[in-house]
Image: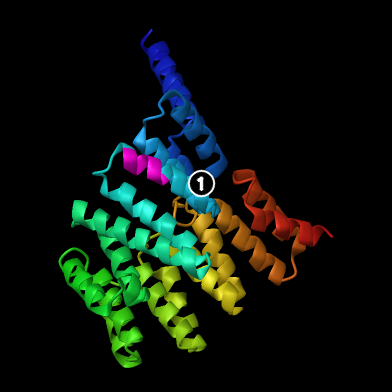
């Protein structure tokens, strides 16, 4: 009886694990890039619980990953209305407004940019230790003109706020400020200081590589991005982002392939770089290298996860002509 009980218990555990794997949470679905499944699950949740702020926030983020800004804004606005004191809800609404602003005409963009600033400032006010919100707000102040609330002095203030919470992020803001002030030498020092502060984290090598890209120092860019492969992975999306830069600059495509394959095989894909986008980018790399059959497999893998991801469908149509 004891042996049978152990066998039964083992089978029960296996069944429970299978159920959990087949029906993960919407958060897990988003992180793993199963955006279609996430949207379906979240819509069902909202049908039964229309005042579930977290479900609306996650649905906003799912549409955000697909670049469907109006849908993203609508659900983020609903989340904020349901829980106006949630810092992260305001952060994501600000991000959605910001992405739409980047693609709007001047008059519309100005209004959306003001909404972006307001939401990011609210996110920081509600949680002064929200590092993501502080960083996004600093970036807004850096990039936005004064007429809509930007200002380098404001960005510097946010860098000081970040210093005690995340020194590497603070160094990143100081580096960006130096770039805005046309001081490339100081910017490089801050980017390297961030590498030291983070003990060589992948994201800081990525940021140094981006700096070299902006400076058109492409050999140094490639060398910095090479460090991402062996660096401690503080942000898994750094692997994806490094590959994306190499692809867009048409540099070291074999290493871009390795970065993407490592990201996809790590089983630690994150919402900031959903798996469907990684499959699409890997397809782009393989297509650039003339392997259309393998590229097609990656484009189809992307569409299996996100059927409305139009870049993958367009790419698949192109190679099938």
Quadrant of residue 45 within the rendered picture = top left
Name which residue lies at 34% across and 69% down: 140
Q: Which residues are magenta?
A: 76-81
- The kind of secondary structure the magenta stretch mainly shows is helix
**Is residue 79 one of those drawn in magenta?**
yes
Q: Is residue 119 visible?
A: yes
Q: Position of residue 178 (x, y in %)?
A: 30, 85
Task: Classify mark 1: helix, strand or loop.
Answer: helix
Q: How many marks?
A: 1
Residue 317 vs residue 286: left or right?
right
Front-most of residues 122 and 299: 122
Depicted 225 relative to depicted 92: above or below: below
The residue at the point 30 percent across, 58 percent down is: 118
Residue 211 within the segment the image draws in magenta: no
Query: Label 1, on which residue?
Result: 71
Q: Quadrant of residue 81?
A: top left
Question: For the N terminus, which image quadrant?
Answer: top left
In the depicted structure, whether residue 19 falls above or below residue 94 = above
Across and down, in percent, residue 89 comes to 33, 47
Left or right of 66? Residue 227 is left
- Residues packed near mark 1 inside 10 Å, few (<14), some (14 to 19) or many (20 plus): some
In this view, the residue farthest toward the top is 1
Return the residue nearer the eye: 271 or 19: 271
Quadrant in the picture for the C terminus: bottom right
As drawn, which residue projects farthest toward the left?
164
- From where the camera sits, is residue 234 visible? no
Q: Position of residue 120 (x, y in %)?
A: 30, 58
Q: Residue at x 66, y 61 (%)?
A: 283
Residue at (33, 74) in percent of width and height: 147
Question: Toward the viewer: 105 or 206?
Answer: 105
On the image, the x and y values in percent for residue 106 come to 49, 70
Q: Left of 269 or right of it: where is 91?
A: left
């Amino acid at each position: 009886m004891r042996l049978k009980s152990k066998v039964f218990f083992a089978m029960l555990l296996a069944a429970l694990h299978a159920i959990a794997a087949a029906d993960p949470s919407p958060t897990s679905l988003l992180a793993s890039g199963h955006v279609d499944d996430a949207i379906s699950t979240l819509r069902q949740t909202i049908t039964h619980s229309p005042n579930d702020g977290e479900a609306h926030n996650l649905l906003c983020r799912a549409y955000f990953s697909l670049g469907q800004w109006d849908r993203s804004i609508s659900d983020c606005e609903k989340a904020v209305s349901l829980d106006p004191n949630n810092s992260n809800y305001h952060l994501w609404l600000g991000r959605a407004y910001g992405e739409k602003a980047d693609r709007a005409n001047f008059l519309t963009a100005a209004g959306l940019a003001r909404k972006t600033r307001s939401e990011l400032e609210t996110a920081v006010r509600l949680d002064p230790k929200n590092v993501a919100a502080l960083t996004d707000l600093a970036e807004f102040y850096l990039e936005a003109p004064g007429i809509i609330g930007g200002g380098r002095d404001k960005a510097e203030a946010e860098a000081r706020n970040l210093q005690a919470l995340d020194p590497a992020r603070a160094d990143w803001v100081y580096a960006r400020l130096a770039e805005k002030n046309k001081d490339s030498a100081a910017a490089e020092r801050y980017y390297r200081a961030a590498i030291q502060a983070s003990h060589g984290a992948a994201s800081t090598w990525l940021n140094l590589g981006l700096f070299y890209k902006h400076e058109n120092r492409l050999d140094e860019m490639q060398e910095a991005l090479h460090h991402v492969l062996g660096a401690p992975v503080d942000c898994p999306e750094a692997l994806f982002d490094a590959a994306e830069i190499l692809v867009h600059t048409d540099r070291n495509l074999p290493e871009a392939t390795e970065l993407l394959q490592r990201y996809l095989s790590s089983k630690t894909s994150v919402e900031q770089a959903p798996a469907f986008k990684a499959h699409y980018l890997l397809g782009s790399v393989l297509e650039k290298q003339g392997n259309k059959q393998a590229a097609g497999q990656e484009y189809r893998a992307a569409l299996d996860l996100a059927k409305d991801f139009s870049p993958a469908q367009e790419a698949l149509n192109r190679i099938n002509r």
